[in-house]
Image (spheres, rainbow, N blue to C red):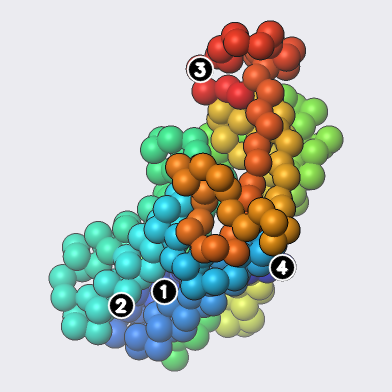
Amino acid sequence: MTAILTALGYAGLTLLLGSALARRWLTPGRPGVGPGFAGLALLLLAWGGQVAVTLSTLGMTGMADVLDYVTTTATGRAMLTGLLGATLLLAVEVAAWPALLAAGMAGVTLWGVAGIGHGEGHGAWVRALHAVHAGAMTVWLGGVLALTTARRLPPDLARRFTPAALGSVITLAVTGLLMATEHLTALREWVDTPYGRALLLKLALVAAALLAAILVRHAFARQAWVRLALSREALVLAAVLGVTGVLSTTAPPGGHSEHAHGSASVTVSKSRSVPRCADPETRPHRGTDAPCVVLDLKPQDAAGTPLPAGERAPTGRL
């Protein structure tokens, strides 16, 4: 379910940013703002669903729990940032304000999106990589969708879009490689882990999308079956989004954060006899029915050997 919701979120981002880019540059005046509103709705649905799944798993379903989650957790704040940027971008598009302002709001939206999933917990550099990666994908797929739905498909549209598409592919390759080296530190992890195999599948689909893009270019040159070729490319790129949803919800071999190391046992108690954590400073949520989460953290050194009691773990490690 989480993977499906994540893929829906990426689809919403593509509709929102891709339609704005097409309207401003590729196919001026088209499409209207309808796809942008649909994209915002998908973002709300996807992120709202993710919050609901997370909190329901912990038995935290009160409104106070939801408010606490979206305001006190890194993921929740990233969602709020993304929704704020998306809403302001739509306002800019409806009012037809300058493109520079629209680009700024798109950047805010992408920064919020990058803070959800693997971009969280790795610092500003890796989060920026995720933001640029997502932005390049929206340019590529958004442009293809705009061309597919355009009323006319003259050759100059292909000439206009090709540099942007090529730039997106190069950006995706560079940022993807950098992110892969962040999460996959050994070659065997590419085939021995679910994360590595999902990434290989995504790379295969991207290669198929590149082949489809070449066929689109030839179709434009011949002015024959152009829309069919564009539809094939769009379908392959949609499959890439689906695999990205799976990839984003699959834990990398080294953990979710660059500091993730060590072990912890977590006990969640929903007993009425323990309605809340005893220490207000460690209680994650204020609701009187919130379960108590008890962490038993075991410090380890860089090799994974448990440390003696009282000895500090290396910086950033548990």
Question: Of label 2 and label 3, which has the lower sequence position?
Answer: 2
Look at 40% across and 83% down and name the residue there.
Answer: 37
What's the mark number on residue 1? Answer: 4
Along the line of sight, the residue nearer the viewer: 74 or 55: 55
Name the residue rendered at 39%, 38% in the picture. 124
Image quarter of residue 195: top right
Judging depth in this view, the residue of 231 and 312 nearest the camera is: 312
Image quadrant containing the C terminus: top right
Residue 208: which disc?
none
Q: What's the CA distance linking mark 1 and mark 2?
A: 8 Å
Q: Nearer the viewer, residue 45 or 25?
A: 45
* Residue 77: image location, x then y, percent: 40, 56
Query: What is the C-alpha distance between the residues marked 2 and 4?
Result: 28 Å
Q: Which residue is mark 3?
A: 315
**What residue is shown at x 32% (from left), y 57% (from top)?**
107
Residue 101 in the image: state x and y as whole percent.
19, 65
For the residues labelled 2 and 3, the Cα–Cα distance comes to 43 Å
Picture disc at residue 90: 2
Task: Give the mark nearest the N terminus, 2 or 4.
Answer: 4
Task: Answer with mark 1 or mark 2, whichever residue precedes in sequence.
Answer: 1
Label 4 secondary element: loop
Q: Are marks 1 and 2 in contact (CB under 8 Å)?
A: yes
Left or right, residue 295 beside residue 70: right
Q: Residues within 10 Å of mark 3 (few under 14, many from 20)?
A: few
Spatial CA distance of label 3 from label 1 is 40 Å
Label 1: how many residues lie within 10 Å, few (<14), some (14-19) or many (20+)? many
**Tag 4: amino acid:** Met
Amino acid at dot 3: Thr
Residue wearing tag 1? 16
Whether residue 142 is situated above or below residue 282 in the rendered picture: below
